[in-house]
Structures are given as structure tokens and as C-alpha cells.
Amino acid sequence: MVDVQIETRPPAEAGLPPLELLIAAPRGFCAGVDRAIRIVELAIEKFGAPVYVRHEIVHNKYVVDTLKAQGAIFVEELDEVPDDAPVVFSAHGVPKAVPNKATERGLTWLDATCPLVSKVHRQAERLSEQGRHILFIGHAGHPEVIGTLGQLPEGAMTLVETMEDVAALAPADPDNLAFLTQTTLSVDDTADIVEALKARFPSIHGPRGEDICYATSNRQAAVKAIAHECDAMLVIGAPNSSNSVRLVEVAEREGARARLVQRAEEIDFDWIEGVKILGITAGASAPEVLVREVVAKIATRYAISEREITTTVEKMSFKLPHGLAA
Ligand code: 0CG
Ligand code: SF4
């Protein structure tokens, strides 16, 4: 663990109350988010504006607004894309029917699905080909879950959200099961669900641990490393960002009050009152510029000192799709 003192402003000098900011690392953008944003930017360069994007490319309004300003148009469904415009599918992945439909319509489409999500898609196909019924651990309604369930015909997978769901399962062939997971789940909750599945169905086939991605687990571990020291914690991220919401839960479980904020303007200073050490992190879809915005806003009310705690250094990067790579 690396502990870096970034900046210190003596309280006396500013005449403001002191507040220590404990900043988690890794935080913010992951390799899948970087790649997805780059795909939209390169598509605009290559095809010219407008480029349509099906669903928020990543769950962050600042990112979406920045790309809108560059010529991206965001829609929820393929039907909203005109015949002559290129379309990018978001990092969360899409059901098979979506690229199929796009091809049928003769659309130019690009897939910004994170390679780690695509890996789960391929695994689902493989397991199904082996004749296994798949139990998919995830949150109902999330676009990644809709996309992954949509890799196979209806009925080939059953969604499992909770321990109660595990208890209620009544599979037709209990000896021929497999499980897969959403990439942005709580590491601890998922371990419990996987354990319960293995206890009920000892022959269940699955990944070594689960399919939670490196970025999700690293950000949760970084929060765990600082939360016990923090009186409260701010997570920069959107309410529809699964991995960001999980970071709030992790902090709370470690005993820190925690809140999600999308931008500095959402900081509730009454909620921070009396806090001596404030933790800060950011979900995988939140750019670092928003972390700096939040820190700058806090510095208008407190004499802050910043300390960054690094639990691991990430070196992951993903290739761009053929045709877009330089
Ligand atoms: O965490 P989820 O899956 O909701 O997505 P977000 O866009 O917040 O971050 C990474 C991706 C894709
Ligand atoms: Fe990929 Fe994980 Fe980032 Fe999602 S959070 S885009 S699965 S690396």
C-alpha cells in the first residue's frame, strides 16, 4: 500500500476548519470505459457527426454531455437510429438481437462492449452448447444483465439476485447447471451467493471465483483499505452506475457513512459537518476531472490536506475494434 501526501494547506493560514481527504487508488476510469469513450470519439472522427450511441456509453452524465458536444446522439433503442447513421453499442453490452437487427437494416455499427463483458457472453454460449442451464448472478434491469441474458434464447438462463433466490431455485436438471455473474457486483455478496449455489448444487460449473472484473474488485478493495479510517466517504459516480453504487455499500459496511455524488454541486456540506477525515473515491465511469472538481469545492470550505492510498497499480488496456485502431 502506497501512502502519498499530495498537498497540505495549514488550517491557520486559510482560517478554515481542517479536513483530511483520504483518496482511494485505484479509482475512476477502467480500461473498458477508456476504450468505449475512445470508440465514440474515433467513430466521430471517421464517419463525421452525428454518430448515434445506443444507451449511455458509460453511466456518467459528464462523459455523455462531453461526447454530445462532439457530435454523439444518445438513444435507448436501435429504432431511434436513422438508416444512414453509424451507431455504437455501449460498454455494458447488448442482447444478440441488437447487432443482428442492425446488420439486417444495413447499419454501420460498432461494438463498445467491454471485452470483459464479451468474455462472459462467450462463456454463456459455450456453457449452453454443453447443455447446461445457466444461473446468472446480477441485478435485474441493468443493461449488462439484459445484454448477457440476451445472448441466449429465453429460458436458457435464470437470473439470481439474492440468497432468497438461491433458496427458491427449482431447476429441472440440478446436476447440469453452471453460473456466471455480472462484472460489477459486490465481491462479498457474490461470494456468499456462489457459496450458497455450490452448497445446493455441488456439481455446478462456474468460473474460478466469479466474473467480477479487475476494476470493480480493485476499487472495492481500495475503499476497504481506507473506509475504517474515514468518518464519511464520498463516491463520485451516478445512481445508475452499478460499480459506483457498490462502492457506497462497501464503505458503509466498513463503518463509514457514504454518499454518491455526481458533481461537486451535489455535495451536502451539512452532511460533512464535524467530519475530520473524509474518504473520496470514484466509480469506473467517473473521470478524474470530477474528483478534482469535488476536491476544489471542498477546499472552498475547509483547509484540506490530501492523502492518496494506493492498494494496487492497474496496467490494463484493451485493443480497439478492427477498423478504428490507428
Ligand atoms: O457499473 P455499471 O455496469 O453500471 O457501468 P458504468 O458505466 O458505471 O461503468 C463501467 C462500465 C461499463
Ligand atoms: Fe469492463 Fe469492468 Fe470497466 Fe465494466 S467496470 S467496463 S467490466 S473493466
Image: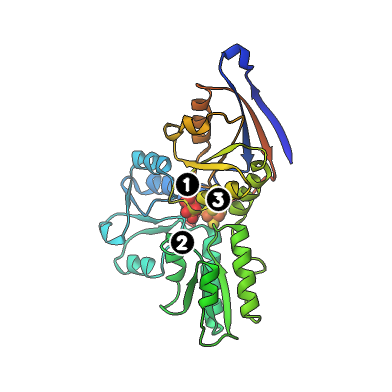
Tag 2 residue: 144
Few, some or many residues within 10 Å of mark 3 (<14, 14–19, 20+): some
Q: Residue at x 56, y 42 (%)?
A: 257
Q: Residue at x 31, y 69 (%)?
A: 104
Residue that lies at the very extreme toward the right in this rendered image: 1
Numbered-mark total: 3
Q: Residue at x 49, y 34 (%)?
A: 271
Tag 1 residue: 38
Amino acid of disc 1: Arg
Per the model, the C-alpha gap separating discs 3 and 2 is 20 Å
Chain-order first, disc 2 or disc 1: 1
Left or right: 5 as drawn, with respect to 19: right
34 w.r.t. 12: above or below: below
**Residue 72, image x, y percentages:** 34, 46
Amino acid of disc 2: Glu
Helix, strand, or loop for circle 2?
A: helix
The picture quadrant where one finds residue 19 is top right
**Residue 177, image x, y percentages:** 57, 81
Q: Label 2 CB, ligand 1: below 8 Å?
A: yes
Amino acid of disc 3: Glu
Helix, strand, or loop for circle 3?
A: helix
Tag 3 residue: 249
Per the model, the C-alpha gap separating discs 3 and 1 is 30 Å
Task: Residue 86: tell me if it is visible.
Answer: yes
Task: Residue 325: tell me if it is visible.
Answer: no
**Residue 34, image x, y percentages:** 52, 47
Q: Quadrant of the N terminus?
A: top right
Left or right: 102 as drawn, with respect to 270: left
Per the model, the C-alpha gap separating discs 2 and 1 is 20 Å
41 or 256: nearer the viewer? 256
